[in-house]
Amino acid sequence: MSENRPTIKKKRQPVSDRRKFILNMARGAGLASMGGFIWSAYIDEVTASTLILRPPGAIKEEDFLKTCIKCGLCVIACPYDTLVLAKPGDNKPLGTPYFIPRDIPCYMCPDIPCVPVCPTGALDEKSVTTDGVLDINIAEMGLAVVDADSCIAFWGIQCDACYRACPILGVAITIEYSKNERTGKHAFMKPVVHSEACTGCGLCERACVTEKPAIFVLPRETAMGRAGDYYIKGWDKDDEKRLENASEIKTTTEISKESAVDSLNDAGDLY
Amino acid sequence: MATLWNNYRYLILRRFTQVGLLVLYFGANAWGWTVLMGNLSSSKVLGVIPLSDPFAALQMLAAGAVIAADLLLGVLLLTLFYFIIGGRAFCSWVCPVNMITDSANFLRRKLDFDRVQGIKQPASRNIRYWVLALSLIISAVMGVTAFEFLSPISMVHRGIVFGLGFGWAAMLIIFLFDLFVLKNGWCGHICPLGGFYSILGKFSLIRVHHTQENCTLCMKCKVVCPERQVLHMIGKESLPVLSGECTNCARCIEVCDDDALGFSIRNLVKNKKTGE
C-alpha cells in the first residue's frame, strides 16, 4: 500500500507546460492533416468532372481550374444565357462557367462578348484572335460526335438538320453520299463532322431531331484520339514537321543466353 | 423611434449595405445593370474599376496560376481599402454569411443557449489561421484554388446572384453549426477568409475606442460581440480595439448605454510613442 501512494500522487501532478505545449502542437498538426486529407479528397472529387463544355477561349482544363475566379462576368456578358455557373448539385467543378448545348448552345457571336471581360485570363483572348481580330470560328469549345446507330440519316431517312444548323455550314459538317443497298435506288446522306473546323458550339446538337440527340458535343480531350509520334503522314510535308518534336523512346531487351535452336526445342514451359 | 434608431443604427446600415450589394450584383445578372457586375470573388464597378478577392488571388498564386493585370489591380484596390481603412469590415458589412451567423447568434441569445452550454468555448479561435495555411498548402499541392471550391461564402453569394442549386444546404449547415455546435462557429473560428482579413486589417485606421471612465461594467458589449476576446479592455483601460479580429460591426457601440464605446481613427502619432 505504502508503495502505491507515490504513483497516485504522481498522477495528480499538474501537466507540465512543456507537455501541454507538445501535446497541443501535436493535436493541431494531427487535426490539420486530418482536415487537409479530407479537404484534398473533396477537391479531387469535385474537380474530376471531365465532361464539361467551357466558354470559347477557355485555357486547358487543368489551368482553367486554377485560374478561373468564378466571378460570372462571362455569364453576364453572354447575350443568349448560354453560359451558367456550376451550382451545388450540378456535379461540376463548383462555380465555374459551362454550357449545355441541348438547352442553349453557343451562338458564336462574332464579337465574343464573354471572352474580353474575363479578369483572370482563364478565357484567353489570344486563343480566339486571328490577325488581331476576334475570330469565333477558331474557338475550340468541344467537338460534335455522331452516333451512327441513332442518327436517322444513317438509317436512310433524309435529314440534314445538323448540317443546316451548323454556323460553319459545309465545312465543319459535310454530307457524305453513299448508295442505299437496301432499297437499291436511294442514297444515304450521312453527316460527317470535321474536327479541324468544328468549334463545338452545339447548334447541331440543339437542332438534332431525335429524342436524345444523335449528334452531341464532347470536350475535345474526350472526343479525340492522338496518333502520337510513331505515325507520320509521309506524303504530307506539314505532318512531317511533327518529327522535329518527336520524343525518342529506346527500349532495350536483354538478349537470351540460350541459342536460338535450344530456345525453339525447349518446350518445357509449355507442357 | 429615436431610441430604436440609436440602438440599431449600425445594424440597419450594415444590413442595408449587405442587401444593397446583393441587389446590385443580382441586378447586373438579371437586368443588365452595370453598377456592380460579377460577384464577391471578382467584380467590375461601372464596367471600369476591377475589384478582386485578395484571398482568392493568393490561392491562385499558390496553385501556380498566371495572375492577370486586371486581377492584380482589383486585388490591389481591395487590399489597400481594407488594409488602410476598413480593417475586417468585409465580414460584417459585406459578407452575406454574416446575416446567417448573426441570426443563429440572435436565436442563441434569445433561447439562452449560453446558459445551458456555459460560456466556455470548446474550440480555439485560432483554427481559422490553421485553415488559412491549409488552404494555401492544398492549393499548392492540388494545383487548384482549394477554398474557392468549398467556400460557403462564394456558394451563398454566387447562389443568390446566379442561381442557388443546393446552395441553400450550405446556408443551413452554417446556421445549424452556429446555433447548435459552436457559438460564432463559422465566422469566429473556422472561416479562413475571416482569418485572412483579420491579418490584413490589423493596422487599419478605423477602430472602436473604449472610454473606461464612462463604463458601468454592464458587459452588454461582450454579450453581443461576435469576437468577444477583442474587448479585453472593457472596464479596465481606455484603449482602442486593436485586434485585427474585430469586424468593426459596431454592435458594441449600439448596445452601450453609457457612451463608453465609439468609432475613432487610430492615432498614428500616439501609437508611435507608446510603441503600439
Image (cartoon, rainbow, N blue to C red):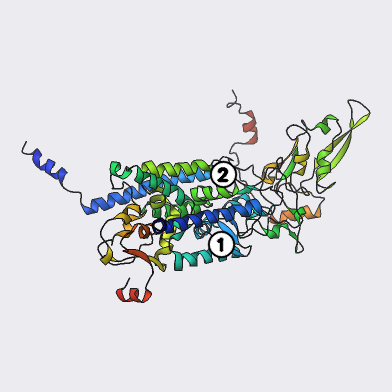
Callout 2, which amino acid? Answer: Leu
Number of marks in picture: 2
Q: Name above or below for residue A146 compared with residue B221.
A: above
Residue A28 - label:
none
Pointer 2 chain = B
First in sequence, mark 2 or 1: give its number.
Answer: 1
Q: Check disc 2 and report its element: helix, strand or loop.
A: loop
Q: Which sits in the foreground, B193 or A264?
A: B193
Residue A207 screen position, x and y as percent: 78, 39
Q: Which residue is mark 2?
A: B164
Q: Mark 2 or mark 1, which is nearer to you?
A: 2
Q: Tell whether B106 sits left or right of B154.
A: left
| Residue density around tag 2, few if under 14, some if 14–19, many if 20 or more, within 10 Å | some
User: Residue B106, percent across and down?
Assistant: 39, 47
State how far apart marks 2 and 1 are (Cα). Answer: 23 Å
Q: Residue furthest right?
A: A185
Front in this rendered view, residue B36 or B39: B36
Image height of A77 relative to A52, above or below: below
Amino acid at circle 1? Leu
Q: Quadrant of the N terminus of chain B?
A: bottom left
Task: Determine which residue is flagged by label 1.
Answer: B51
Chain letter belonging to callout 1 = B
Q: Is residue A196 left or right of residue A125?
A: right
**Considering depth in this image, is A47 or A88 the residue closer to the camera?**
A88
